[in-house]
Amino acid sequence: MTKAILLIGLGRFGKHIARKLYELDHEVMAIDRQEERVQDVLPYVTNAQIGDSMNENFLRSLGVGNYDVCIVAIGNDFQSSLETTSLLKELGAKMVVSRAARDVHAKFLLRNGADEIVYPEKQLASWTAIRYSADHIFDYIEIDNEYAIFEIALPEGWVGRTVGEINIRQKYNINIMAIKRSGKMDLTVTPDTRFAEGEALLVLGSHKDIQKCFHI
């Protein structure tokens, strides 16, 4: 489903967001105070304007209430990020997602209108620490503070056995979402699915249970 998205702040983080939204075929209005940044994202967005997001009249002219999501990707000016977040909500924005650089920033943004917070430095740091602290972890997606999805190498002792025989859902409360074979995901996992050497698993569970089951 195509969404209408207002993207404010076109630094490195904002530009990456613009490119990804373009790949996902969403309609994006991009905003920044610097003309050069606006010019850089023109190939990836539906429309773009040069403007100050702390200017209430400018924001009002954009009709912020018509967007499904407003993303505040400003990273190097917290005052601007905070005021923009607050103004968006006052002007009727349905959903405001704001970037935070510090924990204290996240708290103030949430108190002043942000519905959700993205914390790229902290989130990437967590991913890097988990991904590269164990040789058998290939990828990691945090769902919340308790649950995550891991792409993990098949334990040697599981080769030749079936999902039902391993029974990690019952033993560890972990769900096997898919099996990766030769770079392709197989989502048709049943209790009779038999594991083979060289496969990887996509598993969902709590951090504690996954660490215990896979000796992370």
Image (tube, rainbow, N blue to C red):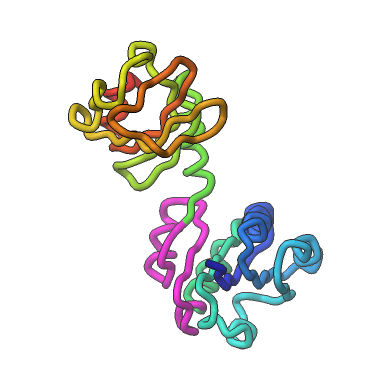
Q: Nearer the viewer, residue 177 or 47?
A: 177
Which segment did they paint magenta?
Answer: 88-117
Q: Residue at x 43, y 58 (%)?
A: 106
Q: Does residue 152 appear in this view? A: yes
Q: Is 211 drawn above or below residue 103 in the view shown? A: above
Most distant residue in the top direction: 157
Q: Residue at x 73, y 62 (%)?
A: 44
Is residue 109 part of the magenta span, yes or no? yes
Q: Residue at x 31, y 22 (%)?
A: 162
Is residue 102 part of the magenta span, yes or no? yes
Q: Nearer the viewer, residue 191 or 102?
A: 191
Q: Is 48 drawn above or below residue 90 in the view shown? A: above
Q: Nearer the viewer, residue 39 or 179?
A: 179
Q: Is residue 192 left or right of residue 71?
A: left
Residue 66 pos. (x, y %):
53, 82
Residue 60 pos. (x, y %):
58, 86
- Quadrant in the picture for the C terminus: top left
Q: Which of the 4 quarters of the picture holds residue 146? A: top left
Q: Which of the 4 quarters of the picture holds residue 130? A: top left
Residue 24 pos. (x, y %):
61, 58
Residue 22 pos. (x, y %):
67, 60
Q: Does residue 76 appear in this view? A: no
Most distant residue in the front direction: 192
Q: How many marks?
A: 0
